[in-house]
Image (cartoon, helix red, strand yellow):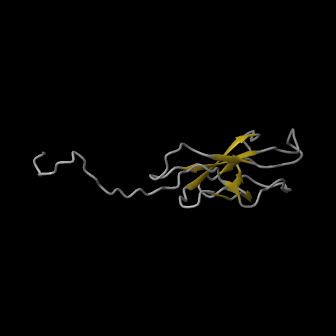
Amino acid sequence: MDKRGTTSGNVEQQVMVFVQDISDMPPFWETPVPSIILPECNAMTLAFNVTAQDRDVTIKNSITYSITEGNDGYFKIDPENGSVTTVKDIDREELETLSFALKIKATEVPGQASVNGEDSSTQ
């Protein structure tokens, strides 16, 4: 017999278990930008925008953007809104190349409810 007067040696307790969605799905591109035609322009000209969304159902983490390849210093991307602008003047006669193959990455920024690291998608 224990101090509470029970004799069975067992105790029971009801426990509520809540299942949370985890950050396990990479972002998706709302509108992929396969190619654009950019006329000659000055530095700090908006070239195009990219937009990605978190694919997780209940966790809507923010997205950050980065250019990971092909930039050659001519473009920059706003990490928060996906706006790609020119850093240098784009002059067709002065360029060694007439095309740029930018690889743009959208990275999910985990919030407090997330248990995974970062998920990303590239276009």
Describe residue 37's horizontal placement relative to residue 27 as left or right.
Answer: right
Q: Which residue does the image show at 56% across and 56% down from the upper left? A: 62
Task: Work out whether residue 83 can be spotted.
Answer: no
Describe residue 104's horizontal placement relative to residue 38 as left or right.
Answer: left
Task: Work out whether residue 26 can be spotted.
Answer: yes
Q: Which residue does the image show at 59% across and 55% down from the upper left? A: 80
121 and 67: which is toward the camera: 121
Describe residue 68's horizontal placement relative to residue 92 as left or right.
Answer: left
64 and 116: which is toward the camera: 116
Disc tally is 0
- x and y, in percent, of residue 36 in the image: 84, 56
Q: Quadrant of residue 72?
A: top right
- x and y, in percent, of residue 114 in the image: 49, 50
Q: Which residue does the image show at 37% across and 58% down from the upper left? A: 16
Determine whether 56 is above or below 88 in the image. below
47 and 117: which is toward the camera: 117
99 and 60: which is toward the camera: 60
Q: Quadrant of the N terminus?
A: top left
- x and y, in percent, of residue 119 in the image: 61, 46
- x and y, in percent, of residue 69 in the image: 73, 39
